[in-house]
Image (cartoon, coloured by chain):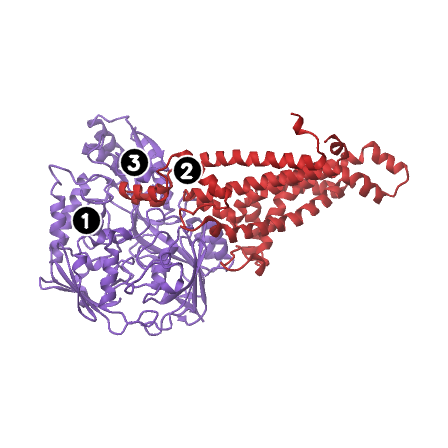
Amino acid sequence: MRWLRGGGISGFVVRRVLLGLLTLFLVSVVVFVATQALGDPARAILGRDATPERLTALQNQLNLDQSLVQQYLNWLGGLLHGDLGDSLAAQLPVSTLLHDRLINSAVLVFCAAVISIPLSIALGSYAALRREKPFDTISTNIMLLLAALPEFVVAVLLVILFATTVFTWLPAISAVPPGTHPWDDPKILILPTLTLILAVAPYVARIMRASMIEVLESDYVEMARLKGLPERTVLRRHALPNAIGPVFQVIAINLAYLAGGIVVVEYVFAYPGIGSALLDAVVNHDIPVVQALAMLIAGVYVVVNLLADVATILVTPRLRTRL
Amino acid sequence: MTGSGRDISTGNEDRRGLWLSSDLSRRQFLIATGTTAMLAGLAACGGDTSTSSSGSSGSPTPGGDFRLGVTGGGAKDIMDGQNIVTKPDQARLVSAFETLLTFDREYQLTTDGLAESVEADNPTQYTIRLRQGIEFQDGKTLTADDVIYSLQRIGTEKYGLTGYAATATMDIANLKKLDERTVRLPLKSPDSTVPNTLASYTFGIVPVGYKNFADSGGDPASQIGTGAYKLKSFTPGQESVSEKNANYWRSGQPYFDTVTITDFDDATAQVNAFLGGQIDAMTDLPAAQVESVKSRGLNVLNSKTGGWVPLCMAIDMPPFDDNRVRQAMRYIVDRDAMIQQIVSGYGFKANDLYAPFDEGYASDLPQRDQDLDRAKSLLKQAGMDGATIDLHTTNGASGMVELATIFASQAEGAGLTINVKNDPNYYGDAYLKLAFSVDFWGTRAYLNQVQQGSLPSSPYNETHWPPKSGEGSNFEDLYNQALAATDTNKRIEIEHQMQQYEYDLGGYIIPFFNNLIDGYAANVAGLEPSKGTLNLDSFGRGFRTIGFSS
């Protein structure tokens, strides 16, 4: 397994990219096999009108009469050429169907990420510095509570609080009319983004706090303090870089989770993203759409994890030198 | 009515009862009537009329953008003047397309539509006379050619339109234009239900050469009907926007400048949008939300319908080939409890017969209620006491799974074990081949429903009715006699005999008919409960009688 080592950071990245591709290939097989278990899409489309003649006609039209291996190869070939096939329910190319929804979801995840990550790092660090003082106790307990609440509940509570019952400041749902973009009416992004922030930030903040506490108790921080370095420098130069390594991993897991986990949030807010498209596709047994979205979400997982690993290695000299 | 013909426009002698030939999609019907069992205490809406909550606002005035939220849609949404797949499709269809005849709010057939009369010249020939000077949304005058094209389009099997089965008796190929406004419709066999068929909303009149939205390359300008609103944009699964037809033929209507129909994945977001004022009306308000909506000063429209979710026993398959077993099952059902548990009180009791709004409905037959002792003794006679029976259902229409589960628990009282099998591939796989199953139906008139589900030739005959020999085996003959009956009383008499057979020997257990519950904002005027298949007073009578009050 010598090829698994050497080459420094670039060699590591190349190896991880190759492994990522292998992962995606295996995922594609699993996704394909799993979507077969959704059942016959021709039946799902026709419902009670599925007479044998209409069933056969539709199955031919959808190429469902070919062997599974042939169907898989057709699909994989299309995927490699960037052709995701046609949606069975909408009779439109999957790429057309998902294009706007993809942008909408990306906007939501981006907003949630750029706010929640710095916020939770700051919160976690500050709580570590104020360890066992009122700020730490209160914030830790609130974080624990939020982490325990499913985002569905958080979303509904936010709607009740800000949109329908207590106050009516914000829109209760976040419809994006076709042909417009979410940023045309930024108000609709507030509640979904807030829900996602509340879903993600507690985990990151808690890890940041734990990691920071560990680092603050370490010999080298004590050494730095004894050297007479200003506390600012101690924190910025010595504590933070060492504490943030494990946090990258948690951020990666949460970002990847966001890519799939926004399903629930999009559902509650009727936000036209990939989440509601995935839901609709599963209900309709719309296999090409399910496959495309499953591959997309798997791709996000692989890329985000790769980035997190690289970032972790870059901030951890111990790991860097072992490559 | 006399043998010389039937003039719908003269009205009263031909009160045929209500019937929208139900054109609900098999999968989407009732999707969101919010029916899981809920807190007790919601009163059943009894009485003969449906109720709407108070606080209804003045009269409609012109202007405004009406935003309607509808559940049950998705990527498979379509726009077609004669076809629907999902519930939002129904709203879109009636906004742009109209029918020759119409049903009023009491389900009476009226000549309020595009035809000024539809007359039977003899039992196998109708003459359709169009109203003068009606124009399509693009200014083209409505003529006999459009009617012929429209009916022939529905009657062409390969298009797979919802109304196709109902054209079976029509001699579509020999439709004849008598003059610019008159069409002769010959029939292959006598069929007194033709006017009702022509009034069902999927019999929309489209211009010659019409193609649906998808086949027109997604061009909204291709969707030209005679209706109150003209399609401006449409994104399946998301929303459609329609603008007022300035050229509309009924003076003073419609009121709104635009109508926006938005899809919702589920009722939670839909109710939130409604409470938050982002939509002005919503379909299928969950029963649990009714009180909360009313307390905010929003209105609830509660309409009785003839929709039903039956338990179906195949009368030629064991153990249901023994009528004692069928009778026993019918005595097991606690109908009142089911109305509370499945539709939260929003429904009315049924008696194993369908088509409650048909003037021939056999309301004189004794109401069946739960009688477990009788059920047990019947089962014992049939040698079925303590037996185990499989009951098949699916998450198709709302209430289908709940009905099976609740029936299973009620059957324990008679010592039966009912295994509920929830099969996602139910339709298409085993459907119509099962001994004991659950299905769903919309509102229809009696003879139209018989044609759909209770004849050997019916497309959806779950109970394998009628019997092949003995009592009831002349059911199909009676049906044909009823279709040909030119005398209303005679027809009602025949229908009564048919229902007597179904009541005594049939395979349906029909516990209740469900209501439609919709919500609308305080400033929306012009909606009233109506006994139709479609939500929200048939979507504000095609969005033309509804408007914002000033």
CA distance separating discs 2 and 1 = 59 Å
- x 24%, y 27%: residue: B384
Disc 1: which residue: B364
Q: Residues within 10 Å of mark 1 (few under 14, many from 20)?
A: few
- Indicate the chain on which mark 2 is placed: A
Could you tell me the amino acid type at mark 2?
Gln
* Residue B500, quarter of the rendered image: top left
> What number is the disc on residue A71?
2
- Total marks in image: 3
Q: Nearer the viewer, residue B231 or B291?
A: B231
Q: Is residue B449 left or right of residue A316?
A: left
Q: Colour of chain A?
A: red
Q: Are marks 2 and 1 in contact (CB under 8 Å)?
A: no
- Depth check: give the residue in front, B479 or A11: A11
Residues at marks 1 and 3, CA–CA distance in whole angstroms: 36 Å
Say which amino acid is labelled 3.
Ala
**B540 sits to left or right of B332:** right
Residue in the picture at 29% in, 65% down: B207
